[in-house]
Image (cartoon, rainbow, N blue to C red):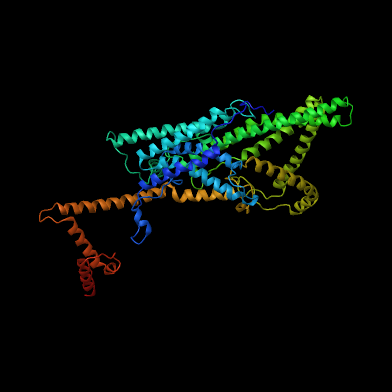
Amino acid sequence: RTVQLNGSCASSVDMELFLHYSLIPSLAIILVLSFLQRREHRRQRDDTSYLLGNHFGIILPLDFVSTFSNRWSYGIAFGATANKVMFLFSEGYQPLQVPQWAQAFVLLIGGIEVGLAYFPFFACLSSEFRLVGSILGFCYSLIWLAVTTLQISQCPHGQFLGRYETVMFYWPSLLCLAFLLGRFLHMFIKALRVHLGWERQAEEKSVLEPHQAAHVKRLLRTPQGEATWFQTRIYEWDPCFQFPSRMIGTMVLAFICLYLFIVIEFYVFVLVRDELALFEGKLESYIASVNQTGTLTPVILQVKELISVAKGVWVVTILPASLTCVSYLFHILACYRGGPAGDRRLPRPPGYLVIHVVQSLCGMVIMYGLVLPIIHNQALEMLQGLGIGILTISIVMGLMVLQVRIAAGFFLQPKLDTADKQKPLALDNRKAFHNFNYFLFFYNVLLGLGACLSRLLISCVLGTWLIARIDRTIMQSGYEGADMGFSAWIGMLYVDHYHTNPVLVSFCHILITGHRERQLQQAIKYCYIDQSAGPRVSARSRTRWLLLQTLINNPRLVTLRKPKSGHSSREFTQMLLMHSDC
């Protein structure tokens, strides 16, 4: 079924072409914000960048390490990029015709282009010039919102899901762009009120966030009260903790990408279902042509049953696979507060497909093991086989438990004290123990084969089920370095530990605050000297006097001074050199 509901729909907007052309206003916005951004350190005169003055500073989209303000705005800005991220993930970005081995470079170029096209959203949100940044961000968001709305309005339907297929695919981006539009409007109104003097300008941002200070204060106090069952088992709200912008952005992008992945997967399922329907029609035609008496008729019926079961299981497992990934995402947020050495997790969005496949295979096992035998009136045979299997496993497990109990009861020495919970690991009845080991050795060899197979099966199931989590490596102990996701996770933990540890940030805040207080006290002392009785001294004379005193105490600084033309300057330098020689 490939019915095109749009008819001869030809949208006047090509989103891929628009992505290329959007780099023009993006670069213009970046240049404007960079011109307004002041550089902290000016170059020397012999440097070519000296001609730029202190303009054209480096613009930061956001601080990925320690940004706790505008968290949801940054998260929504990341959500607006979800469609383009999935576009790159599907390798639909092909601006250049290159060999297969060079596809990685093309995807790298595509990632840089997407980042550059969406850079103004982040730059305008984090710019110190709120008025200019809000105006530029509002205009840029309006352009993207208008173009996306135009594309959806011209071609809202598709050829896979039918009606409103484009709307289903693009509504998260529309929602994010609308939110950014409102956010920039709010920023403009607030910045305008500050510019007109109706509101006070916000104070300079401190290194130490309020929640970090509250966390450090709580560490110095004795914990009071006990946590409830909900707080220990489900979630405990912590007022002394905030998720950084990086985690909020990751979660928003992961949720939207998960939704888009499910939609794309359903598109592919509908396409495959239509192809299978055509194949089933051909099989039915063959059965009708041989009047259901052909030699291949039983096989064809089993194939049709397999196709029907697979389609049903795949559709049914969409919901549990989606809920599993969503629960992982919420579990990430709940466990991120564990600290640098705690239990933090980061999602792997492609893991949804692996989880869906595993759950579908489990569904197929349940269908062929339990449901279909009942449908085909083979319930007694199924129950008989199930009972024999359960009995066999129970006997094997019972023998294993019996060996452990016998070894603990007859071959270990008694407890040293009645208060001990376990017996000491000291052998007793050694001759009986060696005979016991000898006769059970051959049985345990066969048991080891089953243990090996069960170990392999459990490892495969757990490895594929937990593929979306990178806090636990799926490699064996000693081979964790081969898991790139786990290595990246450990690296992120180290970065968080060394840059956002509340105790470390509090220590740095104390040092910075103390330095500023000393500078303020020194400035107050100089101000008091200026206001004292006596002849008035100009600021230039006082500065030159302090310079003279500094150079006399540090003669080596005289040769390092910047050369300056003028007779008085040369005489001043010669006098200092003579004084240093003396």
Quarter of image, res 265? top right
Q: Name, please, the residue furthest toward the bottom.
A: 582
Q: How many marks?
A: 0
Q: Is residue 334 visible?
A: no
Tell me residue 404's x, y (percent).
Answer: 71, 45
- Name the image quarter holding the N terminus: top right
User: Is 333 above or below relative to 516?
Assistant: above
429 and 376: which is toward the camera = 376
Query: Which residue appears at 66% of the width and 31% of the height?
Result: 317
Residue in the picture at 46% in, 46% down: 64
The C terminus - image quarter: bottom left
Question: In this view of the protein, which residue sits in the foreground, 113 or 194?
Answer: 113
Residue 93 sits above or below residue 541 on the image: above
Q: Is residue 50 visible?
A: yes
Relative to the observer, which residue lies in front, 488 or 189?
189
Where is residue 115? Give x, y as percent: 50, 44
- Where is residue 400 drawn, in percent x and y? 74, 43
Left or right relative to 177: residue 520:
left
Name the residue furthest left: 534
Pick the residue in front: 400 or 272.
Answer: 272
Residue 415 in picture, x, y percent from top left = 64, 48
Residue 386 location, quadrant: top right
